[in-house]
């Protein structure tokens, strides 16, 4: 009975889903921190730093995710015994940083120049003005495009399957092997879990966007 | 320089893309003095006033606030700017902060006041511009005149030694202009040192001690308000003032 197959293996699917969520959250945090740094550098730093940030960004955007995963897992394994989860978090996190830096950079450019001028006019340093005036406005503007990026990365965690992270997709594969079949039912169950996770993430981020919105300002 | 000089600029020059926007401009304002700067659009008035607090970099020239030189190589430009109030044409209120936090940001981050002292100071300034009831409002909820008064309060909260106004009423609807000019008149009455770039000729004539007429990046004429408006020496000044007066009477004119 196919329902019994899904029911009996629900704990494994849940375990896989938990790893998927953990990987998505870890890589998004890495991406947000590094991506904000890269975006700030691209928006404000002198040309040597800007060039370096742009090269990093282009590198991680140009190379396929699977190649990055293999580089960060098998490649790093040559000199350091890295396990699959941190390798996947780093590879996908840094790739996400490249995409997020473009979101942040665009959002910074969308903040009118007068905002930083006004901060400087009351004696704030450039850094303080960026931190307390420009960045809070930019990050708020970024929530919309950032939602797309987060959902995209949530789905791309399934690529970590290829280096052996036991996330949702690999658990589904294990179940198919263990039960000699039921591919349609098991992969459908995995699809439903991805769908549920995506909808939940979308709902949470849309809610955040609305709660953090500044009255009278639409973006 | 006398002890009474608050802000002094000497031989300022600046070019944008090969065009000279400031051409050897010198200017000073004494403690308690109100200086008006008038002139046609593109004369360099806004560039000049933005150079006075270092918001625009200069090509050459020097600026002093009291005895401290802003243009000195080792000047702490941020600390000096905190002593100069600046009011923008389009207000530039921090859109992500409520009125209260617009006023308190500089007090907390620059003046390093504690929360209680910053709130007391900010409330006093908001009250001074007649908007105590807007404490919790967002900038986008204010009318233009209210927003400009909040931005004046934000500048005043820093207890500046001199206030610079860059066309403070140019972005306002006619009904709002009066409320902003009223606040500025009160500052004049309170003895504030001010430099005002404005197209409000009647206002400048009424409140300014001294008026500067600029054209093409240079000072054409400077003198006491009554003299400059009524018996200007330079033909260009006379043409500009006559043009404005004609425009007010509704005659077709090109000032």
Image (spheres, coloured by chain):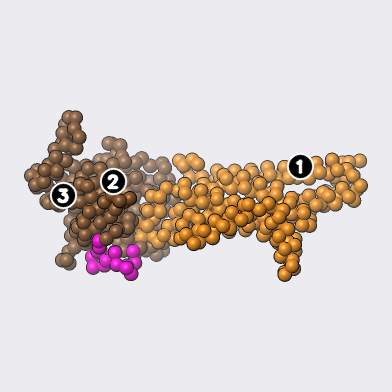
Chain colours: A orange, B brown
Q: Residue at x 40, y 50 (%)?
A: A113
Circle 1: element type: helix
Q: Secondary structure at mark 2?
A: loop
Q: Is residue B66 magenta?
A: yes
**Is residue B166 shown above or below A85?**
above
Mark closer to the observer (3, 1):
3
Question: Observer-nearest residue: A79 or A202?
Answer: A79
Q: CA distance from mark 1 to mark 2?
A: 59 Å
Residue on which the image places disc 1: A192
Q: Earlier in the sequence, mark 3 or mark 2?
A: 2
Where does the magenta region start and end?
A: B61-77
Residue A202 appears in the figure: yes
- The C terminus of chain B - image quarter: top left
Pair 3/2: label in front:
3
Graded by Cα atoms within 10 Å as few (under 14), some (14 to 19) or many (20 or more), the crowding at tag 3 reads some
- Residue for badge 3: B220
Residue A163: x and y, percent? 77, 57
């Amino acid at each position: 009975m196919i329902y019994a197959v899904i029911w009996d293996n629900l704990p494994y699917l849940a375990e896989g889903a938990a790893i998927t969520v953990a990987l998505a959250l870890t890589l998004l945090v890495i991406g947000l921190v590094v991506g904000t740094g890269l975006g700030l550098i691209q928006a404000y730093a002198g040309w040597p730093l800007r060039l370096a940030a742009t090269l990093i960004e282009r590198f991680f955007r140009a190379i396929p995710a699977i190649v990055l995963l293999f580089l960060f897992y098998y490649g790093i394994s040559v000199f350091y015994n890295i396990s699959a989860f941190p390798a996947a978090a780093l590879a996908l996190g840094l790739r996400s940083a490249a995409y997020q830096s473009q979101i942040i950079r665009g959002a910074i450019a969308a903040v009118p120049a007068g905002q930083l001028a006004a901060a400087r006019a009351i004696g704030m340093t450039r850094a303080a003005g960026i931190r307390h005036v420009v960045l809070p406005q930019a990050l708020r503007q970024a929530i919309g495009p950032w939602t797309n990026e987060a959902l995209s990365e949530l789905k791309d965690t399934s690529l970590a399957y290829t280096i052996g992270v036991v996330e949702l997709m690999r658990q589904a594969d294990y179940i198919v092997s263990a039960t000699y079949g039921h591919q349609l039912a098991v992969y459908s169950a995995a699809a439903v879990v991805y769908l549920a996770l995506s909808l939940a993430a979308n709902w949470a981020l849309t809610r955040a966007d609305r709660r953090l919105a500044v009255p009278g300002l639409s973006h | 320089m006398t002890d009474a000089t608050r802000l002094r600029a000497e031989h300022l020059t600046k070019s944008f893309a090969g065009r000279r926007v400031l051409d050897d401009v010198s200017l000073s304002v004494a403690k308690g003095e109100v200086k008006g700067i008038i002139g046609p659009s593109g004369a360099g008035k806004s560039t000049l006033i933005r150079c006075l607090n270092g918001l625009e970099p200069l090509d050459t020239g020097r600026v002093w606030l009291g005895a401290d030189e802003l243009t000195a190589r080792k000047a702490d430009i941020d600390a000096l700017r905190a002593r100069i109030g600046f009011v923008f044409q389009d207000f530039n209120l921090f859109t992500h902060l409520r009125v209260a936090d617009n006023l308190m940001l500089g007090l907390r981050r620059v003046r390093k006041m504690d929360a209680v002292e910053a709130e007391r100071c900010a409330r006093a300034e908001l009250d001074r511009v007649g908007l105590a009831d807007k404490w919790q409002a967002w900038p986008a909820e204010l009318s233009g005149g209210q927003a400009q008064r909040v931005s004046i309060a934000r500048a005043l909260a820093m207890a500046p030694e001199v206030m610079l106004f860059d066309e403070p009423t140019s972005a306002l609807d006619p009904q709002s202009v009066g409320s902003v000019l009223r606040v500025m008149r009160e500052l004049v009455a309170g003895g504030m040192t001010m430099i005002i770039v404005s197209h409000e000729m009647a206002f400048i004539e009424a409140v300014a001690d001294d008026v500067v007429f600029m054209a093409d990046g240079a000072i054409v004429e400077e003198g006491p308000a009554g003299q400059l408006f009524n018996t200007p020496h330079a033909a260009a000044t006379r043409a500009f003032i006559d043009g404005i007066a004609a425009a007010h009477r509704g005659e077709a004119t090109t000032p």
